[in-house]
């Protein structure tokens, strides 16, 4: 069953760039859940250009649905998150400072660290996930490391030059999702998903959280977060 997951980082990013306290991502989280969001996603970056430690502590207190925190693979971040205890931690690669979204992780490069962190998260009742490209070899490695979930980067869908390429990538996501399911992992998806293509994503079996961020913020500027979330839910 698909769930709509709101990436709250675009709100945090705008607040931090303006140098004040508004717009308040904590308030946006409350409105988003009232509107029907079933999961909240944020990114604890090393440079704290989006989610702050204050934000994270408040999210853990107020989120009534599900809290998924993206993180770089650093000892400092992992220790912080083990204290906060989100529902899920998704490992990612840092993006440029001027970009809100993280990059997929090269799992092979960090295999040794992940072999230690995944069992530690599980012993603390925190699910583990990793953001990866739609590549079957990477799915198999994630399964070997016993991740609970993978998060597929669907960015190529929005960059496809024609409809045939879009269909090929959608089929690729479906194959990856099916393979992950057979390996016992749940599947989330993110990456430039918005109102114009979320329905295509939602037609794919085995996907759980569909993560959307910036498009909801843009619409919310005109009609508010609660209604912007309600609007995207009608497309699922």
Image (cartoon, rainbow, N blue to C red):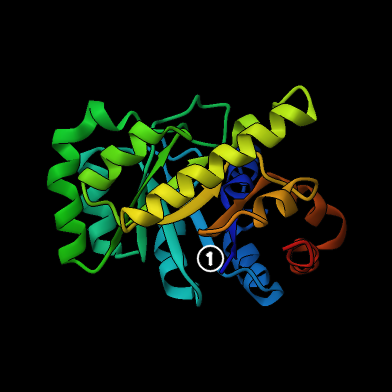
Q: Residue at x 15, y 65 (%)?
A: 123
Residue 7 can be seen, yes or no: no
Q: Is residue 49 left or right of residue 75?
A: right
- Please tell me which residue lies in front, 120 or 141: 141
Assign a secondary structure to mark 1: strand
Question: Could you say where residue 224 lies in the image, as x and y percent from the top left?
Answer: 80, 63
* Foreground pick, 107 / 57: 107
* Residue name at image x 60 percent, y 40 percent: 171
Mark 1 crowd level (few <14, some 14–19, many ≥20, 10 Å Cα)? many
* Furthest residue toward right: 222
Q: Is residue 235 left or right of residue 156?
A: right
Q: Which part of the image, by quadrant, shows the N terminus?
A: bottom right
Pick the residue in front: 230 or 111. Answer: 111
Q: Is residue 202 left or right of residue 1?
A: right
- Does residue 120 lie above or below 116 as drawn? below
x, y percent for residue 143: 27, 47
Residue matched to label 1: 39
Q: Quadrant of the C terminus?
A: bottom right
- Residue 148: which quarter of the image? bottom left
- In the rendered image, is residue 87 in sight? yes
In percent of width and height, residue 179 lies at 40, 48
Q: Is residue 33 above or below residue 95?
A: below
Q: How many marks?
A: 1
Seen at 36% across and 60% down, the residue is: 88
Q: Is residue 159 above or below residue 35?
A: above
Q: Residue 100 appears at what percent x and percent y?
A: 57, 36
Q: What residue is drawn where x is 75% and y is 69%?
A: 226
Front-most of residues 226 and 126: 126
């Amino acid at each position: 069953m698909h769930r709509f997951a709101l990436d709250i980082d675009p709100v945090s990013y705008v607040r931090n760039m303006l140098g004040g306290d508004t717009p308040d991502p904590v308030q946006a989280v409350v409105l988003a859940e009232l509107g029907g969001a079933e999961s909240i996603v944020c990114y604890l970056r090393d440079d704290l250009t989006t989610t702050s430690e204050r934000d994270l502590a408040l999210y853990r207190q107020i989120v009534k649905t599900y809290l998924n925190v993206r993180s770089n693979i650093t000892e400092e971040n992992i220790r912080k998150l083990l204290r906060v205890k989100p529902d899920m931690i998704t490992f990612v690669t840092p993006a440029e400072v001027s970009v809100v979204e993280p990059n997929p992780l090269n799992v092979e490069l960090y295999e040794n660290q992940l072999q230690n962190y995944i069992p530690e998260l599980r012993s603390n009742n925190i699910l583990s996930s990793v953001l990866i490209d739609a590549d079957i070899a990477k799915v198999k490695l994630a399964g070997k490391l016993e991740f609970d979930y993978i998060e597929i980067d669907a960015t190529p869908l929005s960059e496809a030059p024609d409809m045939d390429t879009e269909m090929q990538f959608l089929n690729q996501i479906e194959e990856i999702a099916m393979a992950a399911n057979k390996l016992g992992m749940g599947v989330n998806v993110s990456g430039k998903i918005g109102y114009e293509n979320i329905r295509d994503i939602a037609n794919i079996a085995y996907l759980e959280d569909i993560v959307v961020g910036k498009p909801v913020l843009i619409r919310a500027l005109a009609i508010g977060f609660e209604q912007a979330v309600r609007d995207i839910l009608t497309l699922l």
